[in-house]
Image (spheres, rainbow, N blue to C red):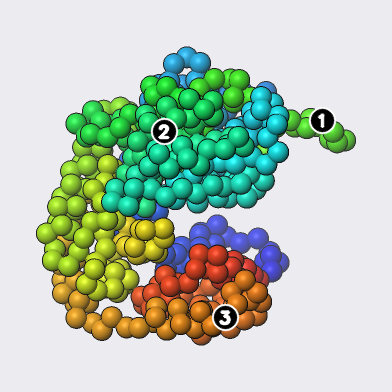
Amino acid sequence: MKIPAKGMNPDTLMEMMETFKSRDLDWKSGRVFGFVYDPGREAMEVSKRAYMAFLTENGLDFTSFPSLLKLENDLISMAARHLGGDSDVVGNFSSGGTESIIMAVKAARDFAREHRPHIGQPELILPVTGHAAFHKAAHYLGVNLVAVDVNPATFKADPALVEQAITENTILIVASAPSYAHGVVDPIPQLAAIALKHGIPCHVDACVGGFMLPYFRRLGADFPDFDFTVQGVTSMSMDWHKYAYTAKGASMVLYRNRNLRKNQIFACAEWTGYSIVNTAVQSSKSGGPMAGAWATLHFIGDDGYLEIARNTWEATRQLVAGVEQIDGLRLMTRPDFCMFSFTSDEFSIFKLVDEMNGRGWYIQAQFAFAGSMENAHMSVGANNVGRISAFLKDLKESVAAVRDQPAGDLAAVVQAELAKMDLDNLGDKEIEEMMALVGMESGGSLPAKMADLNEILNAVPPRLKERLLVLYVNDAFSQDA
Ligand SMILES: Cc1ncc(COP(=O)(O)O)c(C=O)c1O
């Protein structure tokens, strides 16, 4: 495509763009359990208005746009109080969970550079259930990631294993509240106590859960303390754009005090242009996401969020109970949050995912890793609430439809083939040939029925899977693909 020779009529181009969505997930149906957090039409309108009102204001320089400083400081206060912080707690807005996590790792790394200069190669300790964003942060920031196993039954971090992994180079211990895959909250009081004892910062990744957990607690849910009320917790990440239902591009990273936060701020005066000082990765940035978040929080309010929490909690309870009653399905573990996962020991969970998604639902396939077998994940949100009995009815029928389908031997075939190969020395070309064989065609398309491909990917070692995904994406984004 070229830039059109003449500018187009806005109605025409909006119509064109709407057609691009034809194969997207239909999140408005309430049948999609993931990706989109929909607070309902009215709240969405408020969010859009606020977003548009600040679309063009530039967060590059808050002295030129003090309105953005005001919005951010309000959000910092709301987040800090929501998460049990005292008046020393500070933080910053960021574009998402990943950016918040990158900043928290950078702050811990640079804090260690200042206070523990003997550390040559910094390490962070992450339970295997911790989010991939920590791997990304470690990769970007030159920090070694030390992964530790979790309790195989509950999928919660094991404090003894975390303590054993500490070395004189450890700059950060990470815990999740909750972890994404299984929706469980780590034993944060024990983990933070270990961190405190060894003089190491402890980050709680509450990206997905931090906003709703306090409401679930008010409704009687039982899970460990996870926020700044726990001694030893030094930083936290919490996303607005997930369960606070704000427009995407909105997260928060918080620190127990300025002394630690200082290390996330970047300044540069060593070039010929304006001096830069950035709180996070982005430099020029729209005020839209921040304004959308501020407005949504004010529009829904504490009572509105409590109501959303009550409904999603009840919906999750019904779903979990429904899954438990279906013969052949098994919960991975009991969740602490409105997210959970289940599997089957009797038939291919990937076939079940295909069957459900073919019926217009969206549930997410998760691959086996570190003692967590392949499973189906669900994130339950406000717009799924009216759909629970229809979902469970279809789930029961789908189990009946797939349970007698032959299991297939794809995984065994792949493993046998891989065993013959020197995986460490595979060239890109050989990997591309493998991809073509399994239906990962060029141009970003995937087979409509994903079960076979998922079986294969599930059998591929993680490092090879990563290379394969990089090549697939490298191909998907290209001119007019
Ligand atoms: C626990 C947890 N941490 C971090 C992230 C990363 O957030 P984002 O996708 O906004 O970068 C997620 C996303 O699902 C998450 O569930």
Residue 103 x, y percent position in the rendering: 59, 37
Q: Which residue corresponds to the image point at 19% horizontal and 81% vertical from the top-left? A: 404
Q: Which residue corresponds to the image point at 70% horizontal and 31% vertical from the top-left? A: 118
Q: Disc 2 or 1, which lies upstream in sequence?
A: 2
Residue at mark 3:
421
Q: Residues within 10 Å of mark 2 (few under 14, many from 20)?
A: many
Q: Disc 3 or 1, which lies upstream in sequence?
A: 1
Amino acid found under the numbered disc labelled 1: Ala
Q: Nearer the viewer, residue 87 or 23?
A: 87
Amino acid found under the numbered disc labelled 3: Met
Front position among marks 3 and 1: 3
Residue 117 seen in the current view: yes
Residue at mark 1:
269
Question: For residue 228, which quarter of the picture?
Answer: top left
Residue at mark 2:
191
Q: Residues within 10 Å of mark 3 (few under 14, many from 20)?
A: few
Q: CA distance from mark 2 to mark 1?
A: 40 Å
Of helix, strand and loop, which one carries label 2? helix
Q: Which residue corresponds to the image point at 51% horizontal and 16% vertical from the top-left? A: 88
Amino acid found under the numbered disc labelled 2: Leu
Q: Which residue corresponds to the image point at 25% horizontal and 37% vertical from the top-left? A: 309
Q: Nearer the viewer, residue 256 or 63?
A: 256
